[in-house]
Image: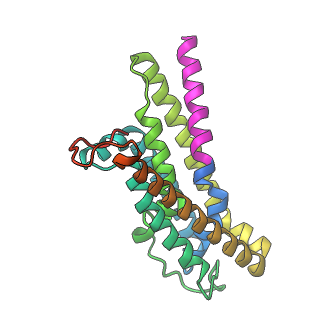
Amino acid sequence: MDQDLAHLVSIFLLVIGALLPIVNPIGSAPMFLAMTVGADRETRVALARRVAGNSFLLLMASLACGNFILRVFGLSVPVVQLAGGLVLCALGWKLLTDDTPAVRPAEGAPAHYDAAANSFYPLTMPLTVDPGAIAVAVAIGANHSRHVDLLVAGIVGATLAVLVIAITVGVAYRYAGDISTWLGHTKMSALLRLSAFIVLCIGVQIAWNGVKGLIEQLPQFGGPPADSATPTRL
C-alpha cells in the first residue's frame, strides 16, 4: 500500500511538473481574451469551463492513447512536434501582427462570438494544450508500469494531476477579463503582444525539436535504415 501511494504521488508530481509549465494558463489568458473579442462576460465564463473540460479530455487522451494512435498511423513524436509547432507559430504570428489587439469588446457591444465553433480549436488546441504538451503527455503515457497495482495508482495520480491543470486553466481564463479591466487596455495590449511573441518562440522551439528528432532518425545519424517498414519506436 505504501508503495502504491508513493507511486501515485510520484506520478502526480511528474505530470504536474512536466505539463503545467507547458500549458501555462496564466500566460495564455491574455490571448484567450484577444481571441474571444465579441464575447460577453457570461460567454467567456462558459468558454473557460468548456476549454478546461476539453483540456482535461485532450491531456488524458494523450496520456492514455496518444502513443497507440501514433503507432496506428505510423507517426512519430518529432512529426507531431514539427506540424504542431508550425500551427503554433501561425497562431502566435497572427496575434503578434494584429493591428487591433483588443482584449475585450466595448461596453454594451452585442456578443457575436461563436463559442461552440471555437472552444476546441483554437482555444483548447493549440492555444491551451499545444503540441509540446501533447508530445510530453504521450511520452509519459508510453512509460507506464507493467505491475497492475502500480498501473492503477499511476492512472489515479495522472488523472488527479490533469484535473488540477484543467482547474487552473478554468480559473485563469475565468478571471482573465477582471485582470484585463484592472490593468487597463494599454497594459493589457502590451501584455498580449509579449504573450504572442512568447507563443511564437515556443512554436519555433517545438518545430525545431521536431526537425532535430527527424534528423536523428536518418541512417547517417544512427537512425533506422531508409527502407525499413517498421514504424519509429516512441
Check the image and name the residue furthest to the front.
Answer: 220
**Relative to 68, 13 lies left or right:** right
* Residue 217 visible in the current orientation: no
Dominant secondary structure (helix, strand or loop) of the stretch shown in magenta: helix
Is residue 197 depicted above or below 25 in this figure?
below
Q: Position of residue 209 (x, y in %)?
A: 50, 54
Quarter of the picture holding the C terminus:
top left
Quick check: can you spot residue 95? yes
Image vertical order of residue 185 relative to residue 49, above or below: below
Q: Quadrant of residue 205?
A: bottom right
Q: Is residue 9 magenta?
A: yes
Residue 219 in magenta stretch: no
For the N terminus, give its image quadrant: top right
Q: Residue at x 58, y 68 (%)?
A: 200
Task: Give the mark count.
Answer: 0
Looking at the image, which residue sits at the far top? 1
Magenta-colored span: 1-20
Q: Is 105 displayed left or right of 112 in the figure? A: right
**Image quadrant where residue 29 sits:** bottom right
For image coordinates 59% across by 83% down, the residue present is 97
State the image quarter where residue 230 is shown. Answer: top left
